Image (cartoon, grey):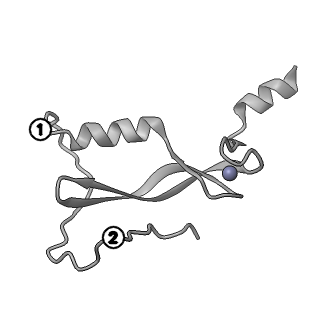
Amino acid sequence: MSEELQAKRSPSFTCHQCQAGLMNLQFITYFTWLDDELVTVPNFPAWICDVCGRREYDGRAVNWLSTLLSPNAGHSARKPRLVRPRLRRRTGHLAPPSEQ
Ligand SMILES: [Zn+2]
């Protein structure tokens, strides 16, 4: 019984994609586009598979971010740092830095 409890509390879970790796909570830089603006959010929680590298972002954090970025959330005091690339030379491939 106590083993089941420990399993539930485990911070890692099996990857749904490869069924072999473990998803571990890590903090990465999250990239998303808001209209024409590239938004980067440092230290964003994500579950990353240690075998295939699959990423699943924390649902609550994604909701928090989308609320902040929503035009209707105008009264929100805090916003993530916005990065506005003036020149869009680097088009296409956008690879977030891999986790150290
Ligand atoms: Zn995996």
Nearer to us in this view, 42 or 14:
14
Extreme residue toward the top, this view: 1
**Whether residue 21 is situated above or below residue 73 in the rendered picture:** below
Q: What amino acid does circle 2 point to?
A: Gly
**Whether residue 12 is situated above or below residue 82 in the rendered picture:** above
- Name the residue: 12% across, 38% down: 74
Q: Quadrant of residue 69?
A: top left
Q: Is mark 2 within 8 Å of ligand 1?
A: no
Q: Quadrant of residue 95?
A: bottom left
Q: Secondary structure at mark 1?
A: loop
Give x and y (percent) for residue 36.
Answer: 17, 59
Give x and y (percent) for residue 2.
Answer: 86, 24
Q: Is residue 54 left or right of residue 14?
A: left
- Name the residue: 72% across, 37% down: 10
Q: What amino acid does circle 1 point to?
A: Gly
Q: Which residue is mark 1?
A: 74
Q: Which residue is mark 2?
A: 92
**Whether residue 100 is situated above or below residue 77 in the rendered picture:** below
Q: Tell me how many marks there are.
A: 2
- Name the residue: 12% across, 36% down: 75
Q: Residues within 10 Å of mark 2 (few under 14, many from 20)?
A: few
